[in-house]
Image (cartoon, rainbow, N blue to C red):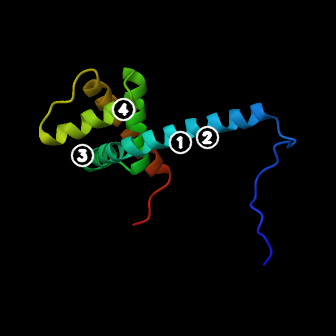
């Protein structure tokens, strides 16, 4: 019976070792970022739903509102989302998030209204 050889990359490959180290670190960083995104995604999606239900926003407009509030209040997006989701249970939205949310929703609604007048949606 013939012996099977296991695949093992050549130690003397043409690829420098420092590049492998860099690639490994880049992959580790990406995995950490993906894990963090998977943990925060549900609350962000819930916050988008709250905005859609409360203000009649489209999904992309709800996202734009969250990003706007996050950027203008220097608050992490996941924190904005968590605070917004807590309002469903009766918690007030803290300042300056509340003020900026009102402005962002008004801005997005105005933009959506002007888009509708130019490009009517089909029923």
Q: Nearer the viewer, residue 86 or 119?
A: 86
Measure the C-alpha gap from mark 4 to mark 3: 14 Å
Residue that label 2 marks: 27
Of badges 4 and 2, nearer the viewer stands 2
* Disc number placed over residue 104 in the picture, else none: 4
Of badges 3 and 1, nearer the viewer stands 1
**Residue 79 position by quadrant:** top left
Q: Nearer the viewer, residue 27 or 36?
A: 27
Residue that label 3 marks: 54
Q: Nearer the viewer, residue 90 or 28?
A: 28
Measure the C-alpha gap from mark 1 to mark 4: 32 Å
Asked if labels 2 and 1 touch by Cβ distance under 8 angstroms, the answer is: yes
> In the rendered view of the protein, which quadrant contains the C terminus?
bottom left
Asked if labels 2 and 4 touch by Cβ distance under 8 angstroms, the answer is: no
Q: Where in the figure is residue 96, as x and y percent of width and height?
A: 28, 21
Measure the C-alpha gap from mark 1 to mark 2: 6 Å
Q: Earlier in the sequence, mark 3 or mark 1?
A: 1
SS state under label 2: helix
Of badges 1 and 4, nearer the viewer stands 1
Left or right: 43 as drawn, with respect to 15: left
Asked if labels 1 and 3 touch by Cβ distance under 8 angstroms, the answer is: no
SS state under label 1: helix
Q: Where in the figure is residue 10, as x and y percent of width and height?
A: 82, 48
Residue at 76%, 58% in the rendered image: 7
Asked if labels 4 and 1 touch by Cβ distance under 8 angstroms, the answer is: no
SS state under label 4: helix
Left or right: 71 as drawn, with respect to 23: left
């Amino acid at each position: 019976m013939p012996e099977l050889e296991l695949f093992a990359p050549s130690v003397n490959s043409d690829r420098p070792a420092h590049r492998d180290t860099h690639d490994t670190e880049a992959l580790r960083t990406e995995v950490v970022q993906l894990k963090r995104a998977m943990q925060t995604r549900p609350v962000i999606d819930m916050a988008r739903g709250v905005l859609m239900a409360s203000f009649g926003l489209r999904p992309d407009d709800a996202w734009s509102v969250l990003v706007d509030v996050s950027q203008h209040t220097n608050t992490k997006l996941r924190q904005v989302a968590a605070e917004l989701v807590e309002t469903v249970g009766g918690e007030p939205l803290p300042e300056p998030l509340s003020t900026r949310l009102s402005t962002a929703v008004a801005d997005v609604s105005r933009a959506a209204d002007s888009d509708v007048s130019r490009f009517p949606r089909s029923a």
